[in-house]
Image (cartoon, coloured by chain):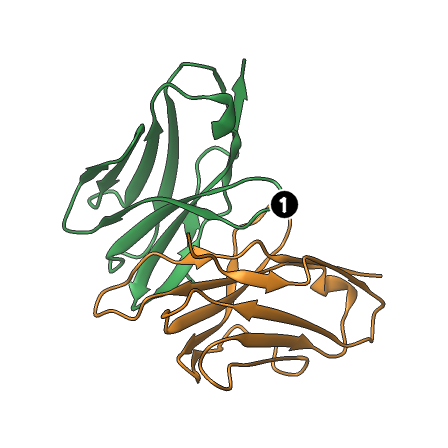
Chain colours: A green, B orange
Amino acid sequence: GESVGLHLPTLSVQEGDNSIINCAYSNSASDYFIWYKQESGKGPQFIIDIRSNMDKRQGQRVTVLLNKTVKHLSLQIAATQPGDSAVYFCAENNNFNKFYFGSGTKLNVKP
Amino acid sequence: EAEVAQSPRYKITEKSQAVAFWCDPISGHATLYWYRQILGQGPELLVQFQDESVVDDSQLPKDRFSAERLKGVDSTLKIQPAELGDSAMYLCASSLEDARPNEQYFGPGTRLTVT
């Protein structure tokens, strides 16, 4: 099976600081990646995506970086807010619309 | 904003009983997914539909699980008989049909507890 893993299962940051969540993937053929945010008791919510022909993509307060050489993906959240507290998952796609998810990183934002 | 609908939100059942979950994808989304998410883990794909056809059910335990999407719109996932290990969140997602992979939109999930 596919292996999409996260380096840190739990990340605690101070409100206002920047957060960086990392993800490693194993399949070099993966060509599309998504970051999801999941709050307790809810389904995953799309944050940002990136295709393999890019190495960086920015959204509102979030940036995704893709390093295909080392098969690494990261999510940067600027000025982290209490509402950002959640579990974050990366997902990779290498077979038209079939996604593999990592196990998640829990982000705790301290006020 | 259009959303994926799921029901029920919570289900408690005894082992060996049958359970069914329902999903209504976003209108116009041809691809529908059912995932199982065990607490503390990422979602795991159970079955993927393209319109009414199953395109991937390789991870679906077919001895007890079944899924259908008869008219290519809403879908039902059934477990019969339920086992203790089936306790999990069952998520439905949908996406547009496109030549390239697209973001999936998830529903709120059904939390199943098997006692």
Give the residue drawn at x 73%, y 79%.
B80
Q: Quadrant of residue A100?
A: bottom left
* Residue bearing the label numbered 1: A41
Residue A9 sits above or below residue B100 on the image: above
Residue B34 sits above or below residue A24 on the image: below
What's the chain of the residue with tag 1?
A
Which is nearer the eye, B82 or B5? B5
Q: Residue lying at the far left in this picture: please name it.
A: A53
Tally of numbered tags: 1
The image position of residue A18, as x and y in percent, is: 36, 19
The image position of residue A81, as x and y in percent, is: 46, 21
Residue A81 seen: yes
Q: Quadrant of residue B94?
A: bottom left
The image position of residue B44, as x and y in percent, is: 52, 61
Residue B33 sits above or below residue A82 on the image: below
Q: Residue lying at the far front in this picture: please name it.
A: B1
The image position of residue B104, as x and y in percent, is: 39, 58
Give the residue drawn at x 34%, y 53%.
A26
Residue A11 seen: no
Which is nearer the eye, A90 or A82? A82
**Secondary structure at numbered mark 1:** loop
Give the residue drawn at x 34%, y 22%.
A78
Which is nearer the eye, A66 or B76? B76
Badge 1 density bin: few <14, some 14–19, many ≥20, Cα 10 Å: few
Quadrant in which the C terminus of chain B is drawn: bottom right
For residue A3, side relative to residue B97 (left or right): right
Check disc 1 and give the amino acid type: Gly
For residue B9, side relative to residue B103 (left or right): right
